[in-house]
Image (cartoon, coloured by chain):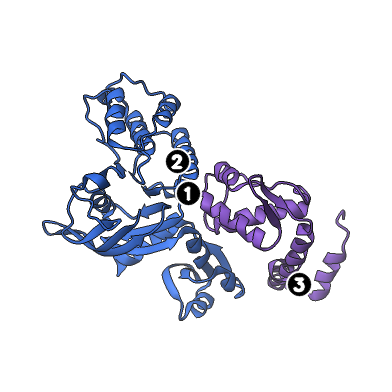
Amino acid sequence: MKIEVKNLTKKYRDKVALENVSFTLDEPKIYGLLGRNGAGKTTFMNILSGQILASGGEILIDGENPFDNQRLTESICLIKEGNNFKKDLKVRNVLKIYSYFYPNWDQELADYMLKEYHLHLNTKVKALSKGMESALGIIVGLASKAPITIFDEPYIGLDAPSRKRFYEILLEEYQTEKRTIIFSTHLIDEVSLMFEEVLILSEGSLVLKEEADALRRNTYAVSGTIEEVERFITGKDILDSKQLVGMMTAYVYGNAEEAKQSGLQVEGIPIQELMIHLTEKKRGA
Amino acid sequence: MKNTLDDNKPIFLQIKEQIEDSIIDGNLKAGNRAPSTNEFAKFYNINPATAGKGINELVAEEILYKRRGVGMFVTENAKEILIEKRKKLFYESYMLPLKMEAHKLRMSTDELIEMVQREDNE
């Protein structure tokens, strides 16, 4: 499904959560939505899934507004970091309700994952540990088979092996049937290899939207003496820089292969680090 | 075969280089089946589309060919093509850094040549 975001703005009283954000997601891909706390990620996902209204601009999904839109709501599944389900319901009831709601619901997958995560059908949500509740969220998200599935920091309390299993199942599902998956997390190093495209929000604005591999190719860190590096980076697009007794590292937008010809030390930048530099710059400006 | 991939280098390139290395080392021979997109995705927990991009480039360079419904296979000339390609990159990737390091250590060209000629078991 095509997602068009046009001049999207959201204000909470006098606090601006999103300001004039515009972009389009054309294809079913795995998108990484990154940014610091308070960057506007959760607000964006809430508007996208039709849960709240924008203050200005709009989101269109296949040309329609998702707010209060039954047909679209069936196509979108948002799993948040907690409180996804009513506390008094049993696991069995939660799954039943979602299976009625989502037309593509995959009961086989849900059953399989229940076993993987050792969840029992008769346990009430309020009796689940944090990690178990997160596991239930992940199960619902994947089994919904919603054409737009959104995970907003879905694994609070979930241990490392369980998270790894989640990534594996997510990729298996994605391989079997492509769908738009929007993934927002602070554990970027763990998941960045799954992203096809990365979006970075900073203080309510979109600062970057780029293919993940293009980012890895078109950004680099260059190190040397201050003089050498300063000379090298003149006229280039600089993200950030730091110095250490006469030495300097600059983070640059540009082709790393070309930079290697300069004789200076050139390294790639992991996406997590890139996000830090990009959002630092915005704050400093 | 690497255990994990690096996040600071394009993933499709790393996939591509792994297959290339296997062919040059002789672990993947002409006519052998190469790992599929899905096998790579599963092994490294990477996006299948990204793995596919690396494999497709190898098809375009005639290193791999597709047998519909069966998988990707190593072409007859793959190893020769790759050795030629790597030779072209050898100067940039190995000689230049070698010379730069030698220069830093104030080594003369003669010293370098002497080292290249030295027997490895010395």
Q: Residues within 10 Å of mark 2 (few under 14, many from 20)?
A: many
Chain holding disc 3 = B
Q: Report whether mark 2 lies on the same chain as mark 3.
A: no
- Separation of residues labelled 1 and 3 (CA atoms): 45 Å
Residue A210: where, in percent of width, then height?
42, 62
Question: In the picture shown, does residue A226 fall above or below B85?
Answer: below
Badges 2 and 3: C-beta atoms under 8 Å apart?
no
Q: Secondary structure at mark 2?
A: helix
User: Foreground residue, A238 or A177?
Assistant: A177
Which one is in front, A259 or B29?
Answer: B29
Output the letter for the chain in purple: B
Question: Where residue A75 sits in the image (x, y, percent)?
Answer: 31, 45
* Chain in blue in the render: A
* Disc 2 and disc 1 on one polypeptide chain: yes
Estimate the x, y position of residue A30 in percent, counting from the top left.
43, 51
**Residue wearing tag 2:** A170
* Residue of label 3: B107
- Residues at circles 2 and 1 in contact by the CB criterion of under 8 Å: yes
Q: How many marks?
A: 3
Q: Is residue A268 above or below residue B4?
A: below
